[in-house]
Image (tube, grey):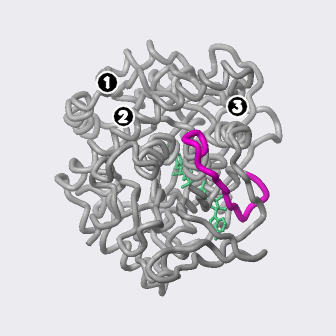
Amino acid sequence: MRILVLGAGIVGVATAHDLAEDGHEVTLVERREGAALETSHANGGQLSACEVAPWAGPEVPWLVLKWLGRPDAPFKLSLKADPDQWRFLWRFLLRCRTSARHERIAPNLELALSTRHRLNEIEAQCAEEGHPLAYDRLNRGILRLFHDKAALQEAAELAPRLEAGGVSQKILGADDCVALEPALASSFQRGEIVGGVYAPEDGSGDAALFTRALSERATRLGVNFRHGLTVARIVAEAGRVTGVETDQGFLDADVVVLAAGVGSARLAKGLGIYLPVYPLKGYSVTVPLGDQGAAMPQVSITDEARKVVISRLGNRLRAAGKAEIAGYDLNLDQARARSVFGAVESLMPQIAPLEGGADYWAGLRPMSPDGSPVIGRSGRYPNLYFNTGHGSLGWTMGAGSARLLADVIGGKLPETALGSFGLDRFG
Ligand SMILES: Cc1cc2nc3c(=O)[nH]c(=O)nc-3n(C[C@H](O)[C@H](O)[C@H](O)COP(=O)(O)OP(=O)(O)OC[C@H]3O[C@@H](n4cnc5c(N)ncnc54)[C@H](O)[C@@H]3O)c2cc1C
């Protein structure tokens, strides 16, 4: 089949790659001049099966009120006169229940574990072909750190649910956290940490480096990358999509896959389809460290109180966090971006970034209200598929969702294999 994939982030590139691997004729259309230049560019780097629980939960409305007006608050809401924002917020609010959160853990976990498997598989294939992948992957686990006992207790209660799905976790005291990650010694001495939850099989890696390397393999498999081409609309005729209208003309196809991150909802809207994917802005700071030996962390860390993740990417350290509902605005608020790095300064004050090399970045997570991506066929057009809305977990779930969708499009798996990822779950 001739398939057009829209969007060259981690999700679109992985989808195009897998479809080409299955023998389809694939063209990938991307408005930017290369792959992974939007949300997949500088994310937190965590491959975190241990953190697949959706963000919507009973504590969220109270946290939002508690943080109101605090300039460094992990969450910020800027209300707009935008019906899509209000619609998203309403749906998100309806999901702020424990039962709703639990409901999405098993499906998300399935994608996270299949991503882990896919990354290993693709790494092995590339090495065998003489093009080893280099994306600063570290398989030393993720340690979630807690600063108060109630939050640690809550995480401990969720652990068996994740373990049942195949994610092993250990509940650690503060001293065990330091034994595991000596870079936390100073913070331990100050009594900042009460304990942690350690997922030894999780890890981290640079999503952008991986996406670009995967694009190269996809090119070798025959994917035609059309960078610098903006899709204005998806064209449909007589109940089927026929291709896309771009700023440089029409491209036709048998099948279109919409994987355009936060650009997906607008393109779906052009066909009269409401796709509940809305931007949630976040920041990251990446600093070069050189070789600082034992001062550098070995495991990826989540600071649960500050809602910041910290990943070592080779000789760089990246901290990422914040969640802002502020429409499509990508302005870099320097103070908020800098405050993300505050987590590193507090937990590991011995870290000394090299002068002048800090890279500040803002990105828009393509969030769905229930914390799971939308994967599957559009109800209205049988040859239009979605693979989007991975929110805060696109690196963790992207390669798995790509394989799943490619298997369904190619008929290797029945559509029922998509389970509850379809758009129809939103009614
Ligand atoms: C601060 C932050 C930290 C994060 N940390 C993590 C983490 O630690 N672990 C994790 O798993 N996830 C993390 N994420 C989430 C993850 O980065 C995203 O879920 C993922 O990058 C989404 O990938 P995507 O391919 O769907 O979107 P994108 O990477 O944004 O790709 C979509 C592409 O579509 C293109 N496009 C859009 N519209 C059009 C159009 N009309 N025509 C042509 N092209 C178009 C865009 O240019 C873009 O390149 C984080 C996100 C942020 C912001």
Is 180 placed left or right of 42 in the picture? left
Q: Nearer the viewer, residue 287 or 426?
A: 426
Disc with the residue nearer the chain's start (2 vs 3): 2
The magenta segment = 20-34
The residue singled out by tag 1 in the image is 169
Q: For marks 1 and 3, give the one nearer the viewer.
A: 1
Q: Would you say residue 321 is visible in this rendering?
A: yes
The answer to the question of whether label 2 and label 3 lie on touching residues, with beta carbons closer than 8 A, is no
Is 427 placed left or right of 295 in the picture? left
On-image quarter of the N terminus: bottom right
In the displayed structure, would residue 243 be above or below residue 62?
below
Separation (CA) of disc 2 from disc 3? 23 Å
The local crowd at label 3, few if under 14, some if 14 to 19, many if 20 or more residues have their Cα within 10 Å, is: some
Is 53 placed left or right of 411 in the picture? left
Residue 391: percent from the left, percent from the top?
Answer: 46, 55
Is 144 placed left or right of 417 in the picture? right
The answer to the question of whether label 1 and label 2 lie on touching residues, with beta carbons closer than 8 A, is yes
In the displayed structure, would residue 323 be above or below residue 398?
below
Residue 29: percent from the left, percent from the top?
Answer: 68, 61
* Residue under the image location 20 percent in, 58 percent down: 97
The residue singled out by tag 2 in the image is 50
Disc with the residue nearer the chain's start (1 vs 3): 1
* Residue under the image location 61 percent in, 62 percent down: 6
